[in-house]
Structures are given as structure tokens and as C-alpha cells.
Image (cartoon, rainbow, N blue to C red):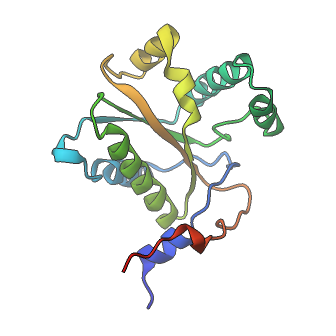
Amino acid sequence: MENIVIGTILDRSSIRAYTDEMLTEAELSVLKKAALSSPTAMNRQDQRFAFITRKETIDEIEKAVVDTIVAGGDADFAERIKSRGGKVMYDAPLVVVIFAKPAKFAGVDAGIAVENLAIAAKSMGLDSVILGMPDAAFAGQAGAERRAALGIDEEFEFKIAIAIGHRATEKLPHEWDESHIIDIK
């Protein structure tokens, strides 16, 4: 059976290097629609999607994340980031940061939205990497100021992010471990 959606899901992998080619307005428009089309618990739709293409803003968020990791004292984690050139956004031309009001299923809703974005991007010939580390950039007073600079109201909190762009590296999808599936018949 040939199914383009399933093929897209199976072909996707996390890409950690991007070209400097910017996304077109048409690509951004489709990705925004994919984000807004994500279902939410009880149809709350209380997420905010910061679509960031301004390189200086992406770099500022990345620096805040790296600085927090290095200051955190986890030497292995800091070394891992340093081995990636101090990159957590990987020079992607688009970073989408998803915020939501605190609610029971807000994290689940954000996970659904970020997956919509990842699959939509892949289907358009783009690639992505889903990011949890930017939470460090939106913590504390500096994080509140950073959220405000993005136009995010104070009652919204970071949930997850995704970097999207044109890949500058090759990477195969991860191998499956079918022992992770439990069949209950």
C-alpha cells in the first residue's frame, strides 16, 4: 500500500544542520495552518505559536539555552552541547516556539502541534528537529522578558519548540525496536 502520509512519517528524522536558505512566505503560511489545525483537549485552542525567522532572536534564545546548560553544572550535558558547536537551534532559518496556558493537557496538545509541524515540514521537502531545551531561555525573569519580547502574554508558558529548514546534512531515520510494542489481544 502506497500512502504518502505514512511514507512521510517513516522518512522523517531529526536534522541538526541547516542551510541558510530562508523559507518562503508560502511555506510559512502552510506551516502556520498546520500548527493551527492541531487538535487540542476540549478544543481549548489556547496555544501560542511564535514563528521566529529573525536570526538575531534565534541566536539570543540559543545563547540563553547554552549559557543555562553550561552554568547548570552537568558537565556531560554541557560537553554534548559544546561538541555540537554550541548549537541547539542548528542554524535553522525558522524556529517555532509553542507556548500554552497551564492546563492539564497543555503538554499533550503542544506535542500534537509539534508533530503536525514536523510532518508538515517533511511533506514540503523541509526537515526539522523537535526541541525541549529552549525551556531554559524562557525561565525566570529573563525568560519572562524574552516571552514578552515575542508578544507572548505572561500567563503562557513554554511547552516545546521545533527548528525547521533545508537540511545541510544527511541522516537516516532511527531504527525501530519492535520490543517497545506490547500487543494486547
User: Residue 76: x percent and y percent?
Assistant: 79, 32
Residue closest to the eye, 159 or 147 = 159
Q: Where is residue 57 drawn, in percent x and y? A: 55, 25
Q: Residue at x 43, y 49 (%)?
A: 114
Front in this rendered view, residue 179 or 172: 179
* Image height of 89 relative to 40, above or below: above
Residue at 54% in and 72% down: 10
Q: How many marks?
A: 0
Q: Quadrant of residue 3?
A: bottom left
Residue 127 to residue 40: above or below: below
Q: Residue furthest bottom?
A: 1
Residue nearer the viewer, 178 or 97? 178
Which residue shows up at 62% across the image and 71% down it? 176
**Quadrant of the snapshot with the N terminus:** bottom left
Q: Does the rendering let one see residue 96? A: no
> In this rendering, is residue 171 above or below 164?
below
Residue 117 relative to residue 103: left or right: right
Of all residues, the one furthest to the front in this rendering is 185
Residue 166 x, y percent position in the rendering: 62, 55
The reply, left or right, for residue 128 in relation to residue 114 is: right
Q: Quadrant of the C terminus?
A: bottom left
Q: Residue furthest top?
A: 141
The quarter holding residue 153 reads top left
Q: Is residue 72 left or right of residue 125?
A: right
What is the x, y in percent for residue 132? Answer: 54, 37
Question: Seen in the image, is 33 located left or right of residue 132?
Answer: left
**From this viewpoint, is residue 66 visible?**
yes
